[in-house]
Amino acid sequence: MNVGARLLRQRLTAVSNAMRAAAHGVGGTVPRAPLMVYLEVTRGCNLRCRHCDIWMTAGKQGANGRPEMPADRIVEIFAGLVRHGLLAIDLFGGEPLLRPELPDMVRGLRDAGLHVTVTTNGTLLSDRVCRALAEAGLSQLLVSFDAPTAAGHDRLRGKMGTFDAAASGLSRFGELAGGRTRAGVNTLVCRDNIDVLPDMVGLCLKLRARQLRLLPYHQCYPFDSYRRDDALMPLPEDLPRLERALRELREKAGESGISTNCGPYLDGIAGWFGGSRQKVRCMAGVAVCDVNAFGDLYPCFTLSKPVGNVLERPFLELWTSPEMSLHRDMVESCNRCWQSCYIEPGLRLSASALLADRKAVLRDLREYFLPHR
């Protein structure tokens, strides 16, 4: 099969999977494979973030002696899902740049036809690393910035100099990649940075990042079981300010050509912090799923028990297993999070969204799942 025919077949399968995911709430249909996988490639991290304790728990959670998944097995397993409709994979950590084989993973997954994102704190983006990732064909690089200034960002990330290192790294990558890779910024939304959220658009412009992705602070994330910073959670009296900040951010992003989360998702952030139940179908275990550094498959990381291990059982066997079906049933009644990776696909694949603004949905689907070249 030539490259063009293979690509067409992949896209048709992905469209079929998207339709099955969209219809899941009505007919219980399940895609042949997820559209996107979030893959933790390492538990190691070089920072001490206030909102995450992976640096405290890595040793405890890895105490069973299991090694992290080998790079070649990662490529073998997830490249093999492309013909079943997998479109995209996000490699994160911990800090994924601590894995020296990361460019090899990117190259193998890209060669298979996947849209590959690396999500990083950006502090390890040396010339050598940037060049290796660009040459490997990385589709998208997302770097975490939680404030537009060094003082605010470093306070949340737990190490002085983090902002300057990440900013230099992202700028360096942009120069070396020469526009071949899409660059973006991830920003934690928390009580500390409500008033400066609109200024993150200016930071994106300064760093030549084309995307700004907001991620609300959560206390159900798996890496906060040893450390929960209640001071980061917005209080009821903060929510009007947060709503204003998010409206201003959306306006600035629209005027500047910076893409960000879809409107319904941004509109729901303050409500979720306020405790209101969000009316959206979660796509965890339907359109997206998570795999940790040791190969454990989860419909989402907010559920503590994995379905199984992809190193021990075939991925598709786990995907269609009774255990996964049980987890999908649990997700149906879950209201534990407003995580972009699980909630936004549900917003994008909903019938109401399609009827309200078809063009916006198609644009968002391309933004979320498809290559940007």
Image: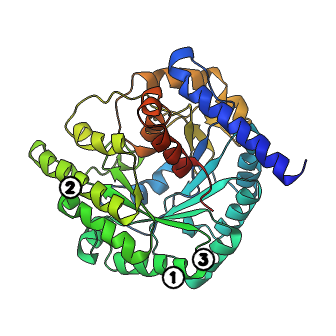
Q: Is residue 80 visible?
A: no
Residue 245: assigned label: 2
Q: Are there few (<14), some (14-19), or many (20+) residues within 10 Å of tag 3? A: many
Q: Going 59% across and 44% down the picture, which residue do you hit?
A: 36
Q: Give the number of the disc on residue 335.
A: none
Q: Which residue is mark 1?
A: 172
Where is residue 257 drawn, in percent x and y?
A: 40, 63
Q: Which mark is residue 177?
A: 3
Q: Secondary structure at mark 1?
A: helix
Q: Is residue 55 above or below residue 64?
A: below
* Residue pictured at 65% horizontal, 32% vertical: 17
Q: Secondary structure at mark 3?
A: helix
Give x and y (percent) for residue 336: 34, 33
Asked whether, in this view, residue 168 is left or right of residue 292, the answer is left
- Quick one: label 3 or label 2, which is nearer the N terminus? 3
- What's the amino acid at mark 2? Ala
Residue at image point 59% right, 23% down: 323
Instruction: Tell me the quarter of the image containing the C terminus.
Output: bottom right
